[in-house]
Image (cartoon, grey):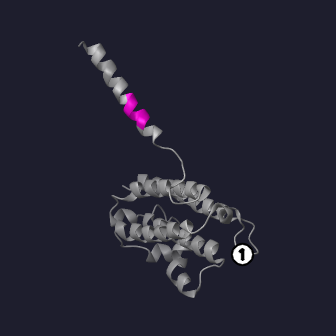
Amino acid sequence: MNIKIALGFFILFTFSLNFSSTAQSIIKPKKGFSPQIGTTISMMEDLKKRVTNSVRRLSPEDLDFLLDENANRVGALILHLAATEKYYQVYTFEGRGFNKEEKAKWEMALNLGDLAREKIVDHRIDYYLDIWDEVRKETLRLLKTKDDKWFKSKVKDKKANMNNHWAWYHVMEHQANHMGQIRMIIKRID
């Protein structure tokens, strides 16, 4: 076989591998859930996986890096994603905000700021990811109990002008926004 033919087969083989892996990136409902909820979960899980892949090898020092005095640390941002998701659990499933105990546990990570910059430090990546994994596990458990009719319905808060679908879309959107912020911070770590 001459080199041009061998090179042609190599290029064709490489292209087919790339095409087949791209073809697997399909948004479709996650099994066990209603169609709209399952589709949203599929996207949320993809974003969580991408955030996790971006941070999984960071050291505690990397997780605590501050871009400037007003920035957030990567570790705090991961905890913020978990806190936001936890907030929307109680908001959409129970129609309320955080109670006193939940505020004590989640409010600093939810709001970030000076106190979070001071207190959310000195942890390994597993600490943050394990918390987020537990919150996600509960999200999936709760969403499995609902259907698309619930997803379309307004949240229980009478003052809110959103439905449950928009609330969980916002959680997903939040992940995407902070994924970009996290990746920018990572690029700036020396």
Q: Is residue 190 left or right of residue 136?
A: left
Of residues 78 and 41, which is closer to you in this image?
41
| Residue 111 at x, y percent in the picture | 57, 73
**Image height of 11 relative to 146, above or below:** above
| Residue 72 at x, y percent in the picture | 49, 66
Of residues 106 and 93, which is closer to you in this image?
93
Q: Is residue 168 visible?
A: yes
Q: Quadrant of residue 121?
A: bottom left
SS at circle 1: loop
**Image height of 138 relative to 188, above or below:** below
Q: Is residue 105 left or right of residue 129?
A: right
Q: Amino acid at mark 1?
A: Asp
**Disc 1 marks which residue?**
157
Indicate yes or no whether the magenta region holds residue 114: no
Main SS class of the magenta portion in the image: helix
Q: Residue at image x 59%, y 84%?
A: 99
Q: Quadrant of the N terminus?
A: top left
Residue range highlighted in magenta: 15-20
| Residue 16 at x, y percent in the picture | 39, 30
Q: Residue at image x 35%, y 29%?
A: 14
Of residues 106 and 181, which is closer to you in this image?
106
Q: Residue at image x 44%, y 56%?
A: 49
Q: Is residue 127 left or right of residue 178?
A: left
